[in-house]
Image (cartoon, rainbow, N blue to C red):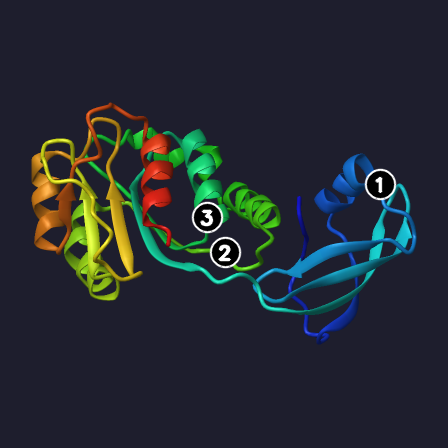
């Protein structure tokens, strides 16, 4: 971790904090600080700063914390993702956070296995652990706005048109079209939708286009979802 993420508090910008069990374990196994050492820290959802080690033992680590810096800005970029294999969700979510994506919508699709939604990898505590670890890696404190949609049609008809108004440069990855992604003439408010393995079915593509998405070809190579997401985010981030 590049920062130690602390839980929110109401004590202002100077306070003492005991590290969580996970962060304390990381200090013991990796950082191995001494009393008086300084660690880079951030308050979840808040500012960045430094923490001076007041106590470090086998049972706990206590810091004297001062925070003053704002976290890095988010990219005005929205990722709409048909739910992939649950293990892959963690990798994609981590990469999205590290790249600074501000909004992620994970949606259902005809080709999404129903069992995916029941996976323990998608439990709130598991997702929160993934988010914390990615923020610590990125030196960030603010998680993306994350939304889950188990109904495809309600998302496409009720939610997506509003999203397109916020992100007017909105694309849909579709191997059946020939037009390629061109971001040179677009502003920074961008949305990209990626389907499941095998892509969205034609009915779904139709609804997504009606909501305002423009289909674009991702290239001749057949990519895994996580590869396609990383490649596209790399092109879209300014």
Q: From the viewer's perspective, is residue 47 above or below residue 124?
A: below
Q: Residues within 10 Å of mark 1 (few under 14, many from 20)?
A: few
Secondary element under disc 2, as helix, strand or loop, is loop
Q: Would residue 38 be found to the left or right of residue 227 on screen?
A: right
Numbered disc in front, either 1 or 2: 1
**In x, y percent, where is residue 83?**
32, 37
The answer to which quarter of the image holds residue 175 is top left
Contact? badges 3 and 1 (CB < 8 Å): no
Residue 22 or residue 52, whichever sits in front: 52
Q: CA distance from mark 2 to mark 3?
A: 11 Å
Contact? badges 1 and 2 (CB < 8 Å): no
Q: Which residue is mark 3?
A: 99
Q: CA distance from mark 3 to mark 1?
A: 28 Å
**In x, y percent, where is residue 102?**
41, 57
**In x, y percent, where is residue 8?**
64, 65
Q: Earlier in the sequence, mark 1 or mark 2?
A: 1
Numbered disc in front, either 3 or 1: 3
- Residue sticking out furthest to the front: 184
């Amino acid at each position: 971790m590049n920062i130690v993420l602390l839980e929110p508090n109401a004590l202002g910008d100077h306070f003492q904090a005991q590290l969580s069990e996970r962060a304390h374990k990381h200090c013991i196994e990796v950082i191995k600080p001494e009393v008086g050492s300084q660690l880079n820290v951030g308050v979840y959802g808040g500012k960045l700063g430094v923490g001076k080690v007041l106590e470090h033992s086998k049972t706990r680590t206590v810091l004297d914390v001062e925070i003053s810096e704002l976290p890095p800005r988010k990219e005005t970029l929205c990722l709409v993702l048909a739910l992939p294999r649950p293990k892959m969700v963690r990798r994609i979510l981590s990469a999205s956070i590290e790249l600074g994506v501000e909004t992620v919508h994970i949606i259902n699709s005809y080709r999404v296995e129903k069992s995916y939604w029941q996976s323990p990898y998608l439990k709130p505590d598991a997702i929160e652990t993934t988010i914390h670890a990615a923020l610590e890696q990125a030196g960030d404190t603010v998680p993306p706005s994350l939304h889950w949609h188990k109904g495809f049609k309600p998302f496409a008809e009720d939610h997506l048109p509003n999203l397109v108004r916020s992100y007017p440069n909105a694309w849909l990855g579709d191997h059946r079209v020939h037009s390629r992604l061109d971001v040179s003439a677009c502003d920074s408010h961008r949305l990209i939708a990626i389907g499941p393995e095998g892509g969205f079915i034609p009915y779904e593509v139709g609804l997504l286009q009606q909501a305002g998405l423009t289909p674009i070809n991702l290239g001749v190579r057949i990519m895994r979802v996580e590869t396609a997401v990383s490649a596209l985010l790399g092109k879209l981030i300014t």
